[in-house]
Image (tube, coloured by chain):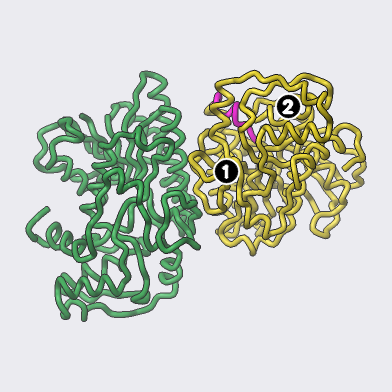
Chain colours: A green, B yellow
Amino acid sequence: MHIAIIGAAGMVGRKLTNRLIADGALNGKAIERLTLADVVAAATPAGFDGQVDIEAGDFSDAAEIQKLVDIRPDVIFHLAAIVSGEAEVDFEKGYRINMDGMRALLEAIRHAHIADGYKPRLVFTSSIAVFGPPFPASIPDDFAPTPATSYGTQKAICELLLADYSRKGFVEGVGIRLPTICVRPGKPNRAASGFFSGIIREPLNGIEAILPVADTVRHWHASPRSAVGFLIHAASLDTAKLGNRPNLSMPGVSATVADEIEALRAVAGEKAVNLIRREPDELVMRIVSGWAEQCNATRAKELGFKADNSFEDIIRVYIEDEMGGIGG
Amino acid sequence: MHIAIIGAAGMVGRKLTNRLIADGALNGKAIERLTLADVVAAATPAGFDGQVDIEAGDFSDAAEIQKLVDIRPDVIFHLAAIVSGEAEVDFEKGYRINMDGMRALLEAIRHAHIADGYKPRLVFTSSIAVFGPPFPASIPDDFAPTPATSYGTQKAICELLLADYSRKGFVEGVGIRLPTICVRPGKPNRAASGFFSGIIREPLNGIEAILPVADTVRHWHASPRSAVGFLIHAASLDTAKLGNRPNLSMPGVSATVADEIEALRAVAGEKAVNLIRREPDELVMRIVSGWAEQCNATRAKELGFKADNSFEDIIRVYIEDEMGGIGG
């Protein structure tokens, strides 16, 4: 089996690569080849005996995407995106990378399908940012996406394209709406959601963290390990079960900032909690007020997608996977 | 006031033009100029004292659209589309006309907005084809579009683009999801919905009509006169009331084929009904089984959009407007 990852150099892409190599197989088939594509060259992964191709390029560009489709991967994970904050500031770049890139990929696949029947599994990472307020406390699977950001709009459009190209039989698409990934390792990115990770990650590492919103803010979370699990499961499931609705809200953990802080206290004690400094930021508060608090994720759960059990578990995943804990 | 209509040569476009000329004003402002754009030249309308420009061209083409935006209409009605049947058969043409055309229009408006603050009212005709099964008997305003056709997908994508460009302040967008327009005058077009009109129109004109589906099929209808009323109202309403959700399911009349036939009997008698010949068509039945039966249209009704009162009224509109009745 030949697996391609677009966005392989990002945090989730690296973890997915490592998981695939550790598993050695996907859906019962041995992995013989990995194509790791991103705008910067992904690191060569350790411990893999098969062929690895590292492709650095602009994968919103039709020519780069054509090269990828020319080598006919059996499974394509499309993780590449400009994050919400950047897509809001740079309107044209957001549409180019987040929407035109996906469309070019689908078009290349369609032409390959017409040429020789090629029909890969395409797993697309969407986001709960497709939902905009007002919405119910827990969002049902059939709730209309009315995004409050350009990023969410681009993701919602990609979902519609994925569904139509799948319905027409050009591709086996599965779109997964990821909760906010938490705790992200490393440095903050330009996502406005960064503080959800920061108020856990920084204190665990003995560093002060800024909390820009109220303790009552509720949001929808999944660990990086769960996100990788969603991707693997999406690549393996029987798409016949999806009907004409291949886009699924993923399960997660609904937690307030106060819940996060209590979980941090339970796992790492008062000293860690004392490193959180409240510094309200009107812009971040305004952005976050438009975000979903919870999804029912009924279909995804019925289809076997599994999230973390609690926010404490989310913190423990970070400690295990990033701080030399008992491993993952 | 300068009004442009893209798709002016079509049935709704012609009726909208005539209504605007009859009214002489839109939202209290005198209409001084009409630009009538379509792939074929629209007829020069009678009874208008102002400037009329007839533009024939491919209005999915960025250069043609740029010319239209260069003359800065105050209001643009975008009615142009490849119909559902054709978009399903010709995948590329459907996306080019129905999606790329709208995006090019929004991009031209955005660039004009950046250049000089131009911000027209843009009324976009979407469709209940954005909804795909399974759906409830009456579809709520916040129900997720999961289209069962490429046409519906293209309309749903245009809605998302319209909402995002409006949210960013580039345009004053209003998207209206039209019910199936019935009774359409003239010849059938390539829409699979044609029989809904045919079984009324042909018998009223003494001609046999084919009914390809069961009498129990329920669908969502509005007369051409109501559709024009929706467009005028959408061009006039206060968009501040729409929040970030400028796309609205329009009100209509929910009727089964049997209801249609009873209304025909009430208006035109048994002789007309006897001209309906049942000839089941598997393809049409399959397509129609994926169509919405009714929309709540709660928001649209609260915003003042008004539909026909009954299917008998829909038939009477046809007799008045198309058969030399008492006129409309």
Q: In this view, does A280 lie above or below A228?
A: below
Residue situated in front as seen by the camera: B116 or A192: A192
Q: Residue at x 35, y 46 (%)?
A: A299
Q: How crowded is mark 1: few (under 14 residues within 10 Å), some or many (20 or more)?
A: many
What percent of the width, then of the height, locates residue B70? 70, 47
Disc 2 is placed on an element classified as helix
Residue hosting label 2:
B198
The secondary structure type at the circle numbered 1 is helix
For the question of whether residue B36 can be seen, the reply is no
Q: Give the range drawn in magenta.
A: B81-90
| Quadrant placement of the C terminus of chain B | top right
Is B273 one of the magenta-colored residues? no
Q: Given the image, on which type of amino acid does mark 1 rest?
A: Arg
Q: How crowded is mark 2: few (under 14 residues within 10 Å), some or many (20 or more)?
A: many
Residue shown at the point (84%, 42%) measured from the top left? B18
Quadrant location of the N terminus of chain B?
bottom right
The kind of residue on which mark 2 rests is Gly
Q: Mark 1 points at which residue?
A: B103
Q: Where is residue B119 in the image (x, y as percent from the top left)?
A: 67, 57
Seen at 24% across and 44% down, the residue is A41
Query: On the rendered structure, is B255 left or right of B320?
Result: left
- The answer to whether marks 1 and 2 sit on the same chain is yes
Residue A17, horizontal then vertical, whole percent? 19, 43
Residue A323 horizontal/vertical position (percent): 12, 62
Where is A295 relative to A218, above or below?
above
Magenta stretch: helix, strand or loop mostly: helix
